[in-house]
């Protein structure tokens, strides 16, 4: 069965410390999801999320331009970021451990995200919907995103730990 991304109810967001004092947040506005959902056993489901790296948006055009440059994502050479699920391990009451391969700048690392899964359900209009919300942290340096500068009081301009938040809603297609 084919599942289509509901972009009005989905989002891919991140947050990273700036100057050790505040969190800068952003999102990616253009992405696709190729999902195979096993309605009988949700743990047998899998998906690949493909993100257009140039669709990054932090609310500041100058910063976004820098993030698209070779200092960070180098979108000219590496136009996409991908996450491919490998396993969905149940924990308790709708909570799961989502393990998959994240690829940024041609570097692939296995990552683990904490997830909540909304198994397929029929909405009041007869459509079948499923969803997943996942969160976790990655070290940006593991993916070749190493640019930063020292801060006079100690520390660096851009933190290494990046918090990821992924919320996806999918609609079953006939």
Image: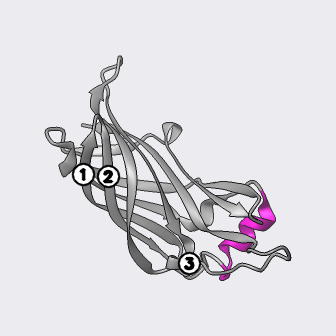
Report the magenta residues as a range.
60-71
Asked whether residue 105 is drawn in magenta, I would say no
State the image coordinates of residue 76 (x, y, percent, origin top left): 60, 79
Asked whether residue 63 is drawn in magenta, I would say yes
Q: Is residue 37 above or below residue 171?
A: below
Q: Give the numbered dot on residue 141.
A: 3
Left/right of residue 26 with respect to residue 106 in the rendered view: right
Identified at 18% across, 44% down, the residue is 38
Q: Residues within 10 Å of mark 1 (few under 14, many from 20)?
A: some
Q: Which residue is mark 1?
A: 89
Q: How far is mark 3 from mark 1, CA to CA? A: 27 Å
Q: Residues within 10 Å of mark 3 (few under 14, many from 20)?
A: some
Q: Dot 2: what SS?
A: strand
- The reply to whether discs 1 and 2 touch (Cβ–Cβ < 8 Å) is yes
Q: How far is mark 2 from mark 3, CA to CA? A: 23 Å
Q: Residue furthest front?
A: 153
Q: How far is mark 1 from mark 2, CA to CA? A: 5 Å
**Chief secondary structure of the magenta portion:** helix
The quarter of the picture where the N terminus appears is top left
Q: Give the numbered dot on residue 97.
A: 2
Q: Dot 3: what SS?
A: helix
Q: Dot 1: what SS?
A: strand
Total residue callouts: 3
Left/right of residue 31 with respect to residue 93 in the rendered view: right
Left/right of residue 56 with respect to residue 83 in the rendered view: right
């Amino acid at each position: 069965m084919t599942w289509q991304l509901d972009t009005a109810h989905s989002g891919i967001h991140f947050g990273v410390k700036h100057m050790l004092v505040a969190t800068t947040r952003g999102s990616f506005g253009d992405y696709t999801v190729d999902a195979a959902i096993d309605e009988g056993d949700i743990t047998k489901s899998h998906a690949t999320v493909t993100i257009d790296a140039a669709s990054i948006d932090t609310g500041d055009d100058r910063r976004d331009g820098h993030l698209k440059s070779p200092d960070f994502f180098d979108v000219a050479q590496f136009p996409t970021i991908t996450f491919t699920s490998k396993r969905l391990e149940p924990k308790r009451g709708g909570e799961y451990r989502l393990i998959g391969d994240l690829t940024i700048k041609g570097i692939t690392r296995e990552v683990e995200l904490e997830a909540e899964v909304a198994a397929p359900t029929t909405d009041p209009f007869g459509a079948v919907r499923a969803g997943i919300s996942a969160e976790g942290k990655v070290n940006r340096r593991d993916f070749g995103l190493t640019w930063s500068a020292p801060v006079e009081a100690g520390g660096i301009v851009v933190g290494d730990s990046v918090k990821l938040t992924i919320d996806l809603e999918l609609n079953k297609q006939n």
